[in-house]
Image (tube, helix red, strand yellow):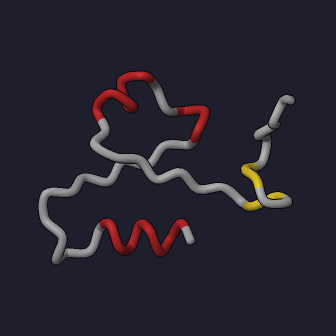
């Protein structure tokens, strides 16, 4: 899925888009503030994001 996203976002017909890829733990506050959008990807693990815990 990652490669499909990269391929689509870097299609030569799309202009004015800069794709910046960061591993989750490598992203900084400056990366977040500079971005116009985000795409988060994770393997599904029993219907929720891996590492995500719901506290009740």
At horizontal 28% and vertical 42% (from top left) the residue drawn is: 36
At horizontal 79% and vertical 41% (from top left) the residue drawn is: 51
- Horizontal arrangement in the rendering, residue 37 relative to residue 29 (left or right): left
> Split into 4 quadrants, where in the image is the N terminus?
bottom right
- Horizontal arrangement in the rendering, residue 51 relative to residue 13 (left or right): right
Q: Quadrant of residue 41?
A: bottom right
Residue found at the very far front of the displayed protein: 56
Q: Quadrant of residue 26?
A: top right
> Split into 4 quadrants, where in the image is the C terminus?
top right
Front one among 50 and 53: 53
Residue found at the very far top of the displayed protein: 29
Judge whether 20 appears above or below 24 on screen.
Answer: below
Judge whether 1 appears above or below 23 on screen.
Answer: below
At horizontal 77% and vertical 48% (from top left) the residue drawn is: 50
Residue 21, image x, y percentages: 44, 49
Judge whether 49 appears above or below 5 on screen.
Answer: above
Residue 4, image x, y percentages: 47, 75
Total marks placed: 0
At horizontal 49% and vertical 32% (from top left) the residue drawn is: 27
Residue found at the very far left of the displayed protein: 15
Residue 40, image x, y percentages: 53, 51
- Horizontal arrangement in the rendering, residue 17 relative to residue 19 (left or right): left
Residue 29, image x, y percentages: 42, 22
């Amino acid at each position: 899925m990652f490669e499909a996203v990269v391929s689509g976002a870097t299609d030569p017909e799309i202009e004015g888009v800069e794709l910046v890829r960061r591993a989750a733990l490598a992203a900084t506050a400056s990366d977040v503030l500079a971005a116009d959008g985000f795409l988060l990807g994770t393997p599904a693990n029993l219907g929720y994001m891996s590492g995500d815990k719901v506290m009740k």
